[in-house]
Image: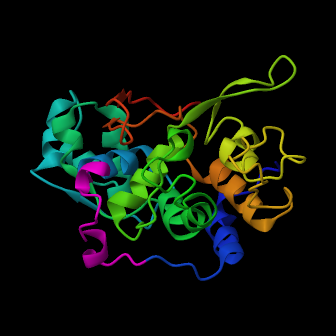
């Protein structure tokens, strides 16, 4: 997949999908749902994902430094001067704190007030495509999701939208294949090799995909796109390649498991170089 400048990411994806805007109102984000809040990521988990996905060019993101965070952080770093640190923009200060401490008391007092660009594109543009194609009751949207991958359609809720993202970002599946590297465990979202992401491969017809979607009980082909030239396919690929932070897929400090699975803690990792 050809490298494109990340500055065109939002424009490209927005143009492909059209006016599929999700409501970000406070009421929608905090509305209770039939499944109950225990099925979804917590507000603290949402913050953990925002910290992990925050990038140096996320100039549209706002922050709150609570409980005298900046002073406490500076005092924890020998030789650092509060006056010097305070000269940075809020984005620069937030990123420096995220990248230079693993103290949860400090990190939890950094509030990222809105979505980094990659998560905004996920919620407004990529997620609607995924839910339309994959979240039916007989697929991944029912009470017994196929393959253990759970997606929720009530994604106007912020916590639900982040849960859908997290479930995809951490999902792996063993697949069959030919050749030395054909099979084995593959990731739903592969940041190192975006074209190998099951999210992309499973969206293609069986005679086009390198890794076809497992046949459903009826045996029909359930491809979302006809080919890799479909603009929606290319938009999702661009989002994975250029939008998401290139880190290990399980690089979130989140303890969560899809319903019916045991609780696991995914390790916090630094972005890959």
Residue 237: % across, % down: 71, 53
32 vs 22, left or right, is left
The question of residue 25 being in magenta is answered with yes
Q: Residue at x 68, y 41 (%)?
A: 197
Which quadrant: the C terminus? top right
Q: Magenta residues?
A: 23-43
Residue sitting at 24 percent across and 49 percent down?
38
Q: Position of residue 221 (x, y in %)?
A: 79, 54
Quarter assignment of residue 177: top right
- Locate residue 38 relative to residue 181 in the image: left or right: left
* Between 128 and 44, the one nearer to me in the picture: 128
Q: Quick one: 220 or 68, which is closer to the camera?
A: 220
Residue at the far bottom in the pictured view = 19
Rendered image quadrant of residue 187:
top right
Residue 132 visible in the displayed image: yes
- Please give the name of the residue rendered at 13% of the width and 40% of the height, measured from the top-left corner: 72
Estimate the x, y position of residue 235 in percent, counting from the top left. Answer: 71, 62
Q: Is residue 54 above or below residue 127?
A: above
Answer above or below: position of 162 versus 178. below
What residue is rendered at 53% in x and 57% in y?
118
Toward the top, the furthest residue is 180
Compare residues 144 and 92 and report the one nearer the observer.
144
Residue 63 drawn at (x, y percent): 28, 60
Note whether residue 41 is visible.
no
> Is residue 22 highlighted in magenta?
no
Residue situated furthest right in the rendering: 207
Secondary structure mostly seen in the magenta stretch: loop
- 25 left or right, relative to 58: left
Image-based side of 208 in relation to 82, left or right: right
Total residue callouts? 0
Nearer the observer, 237 or 148: 148
């Amino acid at each position: 997949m050809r490298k494109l400048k990340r500055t065109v990411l939002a424009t490209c994806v927005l143009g492909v999908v059209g006016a599929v805007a999700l409501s970000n109102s406070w009421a929608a984000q905090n509305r209770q749902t039939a499944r109950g809040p225990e099925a979804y990521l917590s507000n603290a988990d949402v913050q953990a994902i925002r910290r992990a996905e925050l990038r140096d060019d996320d100039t549209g993101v706002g922050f709150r430094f609570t409980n005298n965070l900046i002073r406490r952080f500076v005092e924890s770093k020998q030789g650092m001067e509060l006056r010097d640190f305070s000269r940075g923009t809020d984005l620069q200060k937030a990123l420096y704190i995220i990248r230079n401490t693993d103290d949860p008391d400090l990190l939890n007092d950094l509030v990222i007030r809105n979505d980094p660009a990659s998560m905004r594109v996920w919620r407004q543009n990529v997620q609607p495509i995924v839910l339309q194609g994959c979240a039916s009751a007989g697929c991944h949207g029912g009470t017994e999701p196929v393959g253990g991958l759970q997606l929720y359609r009530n994604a106007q809720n912020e916590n639900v939208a982040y849960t859908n993202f997290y479930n995809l970002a951490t999902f792996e599946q063993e697949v069959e294949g030919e050749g030395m590297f054909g099979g084995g465990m593959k990731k739903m979202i592969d940041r190192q090799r975006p074209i190998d992401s099951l999210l992309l491969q499973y969206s293609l017809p069986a005679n086009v995909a390198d890794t076809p979607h497992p046949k459903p009980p009826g045996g029909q082909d359930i491809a979302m796109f006809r080919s890799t030239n479909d603009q929606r396919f290319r938009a999702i690929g661009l989002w994975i390649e250029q939008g998401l932070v290139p880190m290990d897929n399980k690089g979130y400090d989140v303890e969560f498991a899809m319903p019916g699975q045991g609780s696991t803690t995914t390790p916090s990792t630094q972005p890959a170089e």
